Image (cartoon, grey):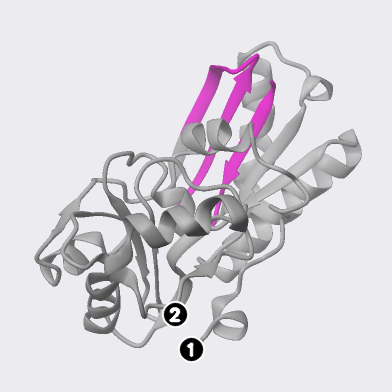
Amino acid sequence: MNILAIETCLDACALALLQGGELVFQSVDVMERGQAEAIAPLAQRAFAAANFSPRALDRIVVTVGPGSFTGVRVGLAFARGLAVALNIDCIGVSTLEALTLGEAENLRASVIATPAALYAALYGAGETLEHDREKWEPVFAKDHAKFKGIESKIDSISNNLALIPPRRFDSMPAAAAAISGAAAGEIVAVAGPGREELARLMPAARVTGAARPDPVLMAHWCAGRDPTTNPPTPLYLRAALEP
């Protein structure tokens, strides 16, 4: 499968291109602003470097937030516009889930700390679980009996079972308390901006080193996802998921 992955929600303009499932181009250009001017030339550079025609793309994956309001809009506008022009699927993944894709052995937490807001989420260990209540909820109840009494919710963007779906927190201690409570003593791998501060507040946490989403991991993640349950819809947690 030929996949283009795009990430502009945080402090970079990042892109990866898979051809036949193999990585042929990747770039992460760190920038606080300017993604709107950078994304199209970066995509053109990717296609040229790989001698690849965009018409051969099968699908596009893009982060949908939370993150910079402008950055979210830039990535989504470019990804959706290109997908419409090529008549292909466009897949959306929350920035918080994308941050955790490099971790396979432990519970996976991610945090995005900005001067204006703080966002966090907690996912199960290993591969994210496809939305299938009859299949997974009995397993979740059995293997995570210690979580009884804690409400588990389905992430509306990715339809993956999340112990704590993406949400906004008032402070880092509040996020740490919620994640620690849900983890119930299990090791938690923490990723994202603010990961070191969050890990210091959690006795069973370790920092994975991922400060921003990896577009290569996003592209591989995207290959098996259902476009109808992973739409490229912006995730603005201030309005949608604030507790």
Residue depicted at x 45% and y 37%: 28
- Residue bounds of the magenta highlight: 1-27
How packed is label 2: few (under 14 Cα within 10 Å), some, or many (20 or more)? Answer: many
Q: Which SS class for mark 1?
A: loop
Label 2, label 1: how many angstroms apart (C-alpha)? 7 Å
Q: Please check the rendered image and state whether residue 118 is part of the magenta-colored stretch, yes or no.
A: no
The answer to whether residue 85 is visible is yes
- Residue that numbered label 1 is attached to: 243
Seen at 63% across and 65% down, the residue is 156
Indicate left or right for 82 with 166 as reference: right
Determine the image quadrant of residue 203. Answer: bottom left
Q: Which residue is mark 2?
A: 168
x%, y% of residue 233? 71, 62
Residue 30's spot in the image, x, y percent?
41, 46
Report the amino acid beneath label 2: Arg
Q: Position of residue 83 (x, y in %)?
A: 82, 41
Q: Residue at x 58, y 60 (%)?
A: 71
Given residues 213 and 167, the one toward you in this image is: 167
Residue 24 lies, with reference to residue 188, above or below; the image says above
Residue shown at the point (66%, 40%) measured from the top left = 225
Amino acid type assigned to the residue bearing label 1 in the image: Pro
Of pointers 2 and 1, the one earlier in the residue sequence: 2
Secondary element type, mark 2: strand
Q: Is residue 26 above or below residue 32?
A: above
